[in-house]
């Protein structure tokens, strides 16, 4: 078993945190919740916040959404110290990290179609994705040369248990080979995958604290593996509960669930922040307050771990 130490709880050195939204739609209340906790955690310890647009997917991301995201964050009172370049401009930086993996003999081309993978593999216990069965791992040079389609690129994972301690969720364990399999670091259209880009950007940006939704908890062992192979020190992770619609669905940008457009028409920022702080367990009564006021009372030990189902009517 490999236990990965992540950055220690910063006492003397203030943390560097980040918002890393994907500009693929207007933020919904769940995105606001994760951003609010990320901001309060860092600001309550006197740290800095970076903003980075994760716009890797050219089909889904748009500059107008990025502009709205900035404006919505400002309206909520969630400021940042620096905006990092968007991921779509950093192909050369990811290429260098990709080559580091390649020079360790860890990367290979995969020609499998999505349909073939779904037919051949078992779903991942934690996130419902498919465990890659290693189909293309040992293709011969001749078999590779005979392929008709451009490949995705996968990184090989070892047969070992990885565990780390999440600042909110506690110990999380996964066997990379058994629970996930070799995973994609570059897509067949040439775009680098989220897993490689996020590790590269957080590591090179000096991020020491990552606060994000619990839907990404099961990605963290893959990311910790990349931190190790690329020679970077991992940050400390905090995975915050998801907000669920009254019918139990996860909020989604596609459904325009409680998006910031509607919220801004109907509420003041203090009302939203107070309601979210109350839902998180940070305050005893649902009273309006500013982000700064919440940072002053913020304690990780008071934040609820379980996902939060929203009532039929809020505000
Ligand atoms: N860009 C991702 C999202 O908007 C977040 C990635 C992360 O925080 O690591 O869901």
Image (tube, grey):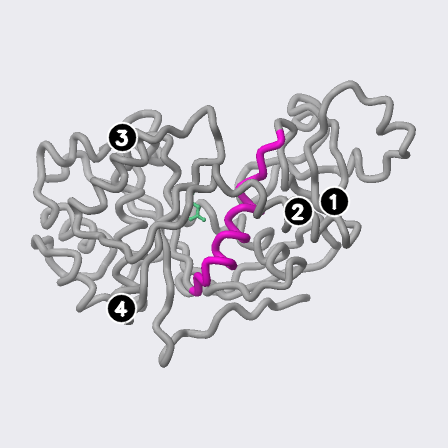
Q: What is the secondary structure assignment of the residue under circle 3?
A: loop
Give the distance between the C-alpha atoms of the residues marked 1 and 2, in whole angstroms: 8 Å
Q: Which residue is mark 1?
A: 107
Instruction: State the residue lying farthest toward the top.
Output: 148
Q: CB under 8 Å between callouts 1 and 2?
A: yes
Q: Earlier in the sequence, mark 1 or mark 4?
A: 1
The residue carrying mark 1 has its beta carbon less than 8 Å from ligand 1: no
Q: CA distance from mark 1 to mark 4?
A: 41 Å
Q: Is mark 3 within 8 Å of ligand 1?
A: no
Q: Is residue 139 above or below residue 168?
A: above
Q: Residue at x 43, y 41 (%)?
A: 54
- The verdict on residue 161 being magenta is no
Separation of marks 3 and 4 at Cα, in angstroms: 28 Å
Q: Nearer the viewer, mark 1 or mark 4?
A: 1
What residue lies at 70% left-to-right and 45% top-to-bottom? 155
Q: Which residue is mark 3?
A: 257
Determine whether the beta carbon of the residue marked 4 sits less than 8 angstroms from the nearest atom of ligand 1: no
Ligand 1 image-quadrant field: top left
Span colored in magenta: 190-208
Which comes before the other along the chain, label 4 or label 2?
A: 2
Residue 135 lies in quadrant: top right
Assign a secondary structure to mark 1: strand
Give the residue number, with chain letter if any, for mark 4.
Answer: 299
* Distance in Å between CA atoms under marks 3 and 2: 36 Å
Q: Identify the residue shown where x is 56% and y is 70%.
A: 5
- Location of residue 207 (image quadrant): bottom left
Residue bearing mark 2: 98
Expressed as whole percent of the image width and height from the top left, the position of residue 57 reads 48, 31
Dot 3 or dot 4, earlier in sequence:
3
Q: Secondary structure at mark 4?
A: loop
Residue 191 coordinates in the image, percent (x, y): 58, 33
């Amino acid at each position: 078993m490999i236990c990965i130490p992540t950055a220690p709880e910063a006492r003397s050195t203030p943390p560097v945190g980040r918002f890393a939204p994907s500009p693929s739609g207007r933020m919904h209340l769940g995105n606001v919740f994760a951003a609010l906790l990320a901001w309060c955690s860092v600001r309550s310890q006197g740290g800095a916040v970076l903003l980075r647009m994760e716009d890797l997917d050219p089909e889904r991301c748009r500059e107008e959404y990025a502009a709205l995201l900035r404006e919505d964050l400002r309206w909520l009172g969630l400021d940042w110290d620096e905006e990092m370049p968007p991921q779509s401009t950093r192909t050369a930086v990811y290429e260098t990290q990709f080559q580091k993996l390649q020079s360790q003999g860890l990367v290979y081309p995969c020609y499998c179609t999505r349909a073939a993978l779904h037919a051949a593999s078992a779903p991942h216990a934690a996130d419902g994705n498919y465990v890659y069965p290693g189909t293309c791992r040992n293709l011969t040079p001749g078999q590779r040369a005979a392929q008709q389609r451009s490949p995705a690129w996968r990184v090989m994972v070892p047969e070992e248990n990885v565990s780390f301690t999440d600042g909110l969720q506690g110990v999380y364990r996964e066997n990379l080979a058994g629970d996930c399999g070799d995973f994609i670091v570059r897509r067949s259209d040439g775009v680098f995958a989220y897993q490689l880009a996020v590790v590269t950007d957080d590591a090179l940006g000096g991020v020491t604290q990552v606060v994000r939704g619990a839907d990404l908890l099961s990605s963290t062992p893959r990311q910790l593996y990349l931190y190790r192979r690329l020679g970077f020190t991992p940050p400390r992770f905090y995975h915050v509960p998801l907000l669920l619609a009254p019918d139990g669905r996860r909020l989604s940008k596609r459904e325009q669930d409680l998006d910031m457009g509607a919220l801004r028409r109907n509420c003041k920022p203090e009302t939203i922040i107070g309601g979210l702080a109350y839902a998180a367990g940070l305050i005893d009564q649902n009273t309006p307050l500013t982000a700064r006021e919440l940072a002053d009372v913020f304690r990780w030990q008071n934040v609820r771990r379980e996902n939060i189902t929203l009532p039929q009517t809020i505000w």
